[in-house]
Image (cartoon, rainbow, N blue to C red):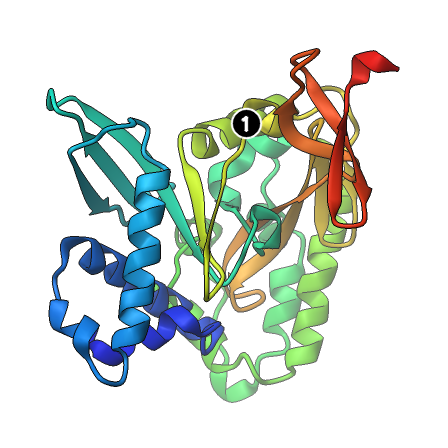
Amino acid sequence: MQNVSSIRMMYAKGTSKSKNDEENKIREKILIDLHNNTNPQFLEDPTYGTQWKDLKEKWTALVTSISPVQNYTHVEIEQKAGRNHTYDFQLRYSDKDNQIYEKNVEFKHNVKTISDMPQFLSLPVKSSLDMLRGQSYSTFYYGGGYLDEYMSKICQENHIEKLQEDVYQKHIQSVKTNVHAFFDTLKQDCENKEKEKAEIVDRSIREFLEKYGKHVDLEWLTKKFKDSQMDKIFVMWDCSEFHVESFVEDDLTLIPHQEPAVTKNSIVVQSKTKSFHLLLRWRNRKGILNPAWQISMKPISGVDAQKKCNVCNKPCKVKKNGELYKHVCLTSK
């Protein structure tokens, strides 16, 4: 529930991972309410008013700066929630002729750039089977003996029978263990022999990637990147200022026929400008629920994010000179 003191969440890094979703929803609601002037009294609060005014001024300036139309007369902001959307807000700008221009925004807290994010995209393993040409980690984990080995570490008082595979696979991507008593029991027992269980799960990930990690369908993954990332911008708030960044097509076009690099828990693939790290992890406790690919990005050293040269109209290399960056035309070499 939002109140006048909720503004502190915008100027703090966050309390804990377990409260991330809850706190982010409040932050998003704050931005919506500031735009709609829902709680004008908050701006005059003797304790928190200064922070409310500061954020309102910066948010209003940001909304203006990202407008796709120069002279808009009105803007509406709609919050988009749920897994069906790959962004948090849709901004709809109207011009004097009542024509609508849309801008999709994904909001991130406590970061300055996309490369600072632990992930910009998460893919559940069951909905991304085509990425590894039909190979499923959850099937590998169930049928490869890892689940049996994990269950052998459960204490006697929490003993439970192994689920049939079709039931297990039906629920494995759930986010809450109460979908079935089996997963609730695994959660209740999670601190028992925790290190031994973690070793089993880590080994299953390592052995799965050793076997299938180089089988990435780069064309499929490129399409997934473009479908989910191309029609939006990232608006990042670093607890004091807003920053804006977006991908261009070349950033997300993976180099064809390039063999991925594989580590003990990740697959690494590249475009011309970016390196993408696909970390395979369990999102709801190791070995219990929701294995997924947590995908992060790092720029490739020496290449700017597709800024075009005035001379050759092609991407230019970047050289760092102290705090300055110099663009070097590739055609001049």
Residue drawn at 36 percent across, 63 percent down = 24
Q: Is residue 118 left or right of residue 167?
A: right
Residue drawn at 74 percent across, 49 percent down = 323
Q: Position of residue 198 (x, y in %)?
A: 67, 71
In this rendered view, identify the residue nearer to me: 312 or 102: 312
Q: Position of residue 98 (x, y in %)?
A: 11, 24
Residue drawn at 80 percent across, 12 percent down = 331
In this rendered view, identify the residue nearer to me: 243 or 326: 326
Q: Position of residue 160 (x, y in %)?
A: 47, 74
Quadrant in the rendering for residue 203: bottom right
Disc 1 target residue:
248
Quadrant in the rendering for residue 211: top right
Quadrant in the rendering for residue 242: bottom left
Q: Is residue 13 visible?
A: yes
- Amino acid type of disc 1? Val
Residue drawn at 14 percent across, 59 percent down = 37
Q: Is residue 4 left or right of residue 118?
A: left
170 lies above or below 111: above
Residue found at the very far bottom of the displayed protein: 157
Residue found at the very far right of the displayed protein: 333
